[in-house]
Image (cartoon, rainbow, N blue to C red):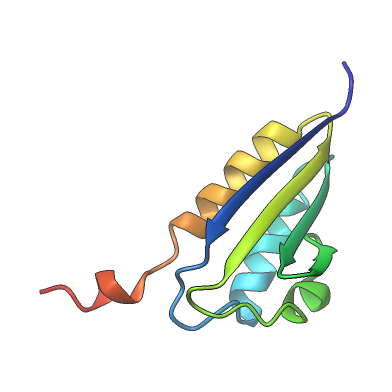
Amino acid sequence: MPATEVRCDLEFHCTEGLHLRLAAQFARLASEFQAEIRLSRADRVVDGKSVMELLTLAVECGSRVEVEARGIDAEKAVAALAGFLRLLPCEAMEHQP
């Protein structure tokens, strides 16, 4: 089966930004896949399996990020990681009665 490359662009909604705990959870989930995982913001691209590299992106609420995976399970990886990011709390949701 040939290696595939899959990308997903989305808006980061966590009100606290990509802090240490979330970066660790993202990296842990990314590490479950064989694919090479990248997360990018603006012109910076980092290894999605590295907590320290993820933190250097300084992702804030409202930032646009791109999840990219390359490898045999790239589609599953992007679906899982984008799903994880989409499930993070949004400020608008937190302030609803």
**Residue 86 placement, left or right of 20:** left
| Rendered view: 95 above or below 93 | below
Provide residue 82's location: percent of width, then percent of height.
Answer: 57, 50
Viewer-side residue, 33 vs 91: 91
The residue lying furthest to the left in this view is 97
Inspect this view and state whether residue 61 appears.
Answer: yes
Provide residue 87's location: percent of width, then percent of height.
Answer: 43, 57
Residue that appears at 10% across and 74% down: 97
Residue that appears at 82% across and 65% down: 45
Provide residue 42's location: percent of width, then percent of height.
Answer: 71, 70
Corner quadrant of residue 76: top right
The residue lying furthest to the top in this view is 1
Which quadrant does the N terminus fall into?
Answer: top right
Residue that appears at 56% across and 72% down: 63
Corner quadrant of residue 34: top right
The residue lying furthest to the right in this view is 2
Question: How many numbered marks have been drawn onto this rendered protein structure?
Answer: 0
Corner quadrant of residue 92: bottom left
**Residue 9 placement, left or right of 28:** left
Viewer-side residue, 63 vs 96: 63
| Rendered view: 64 above or below 83 | below
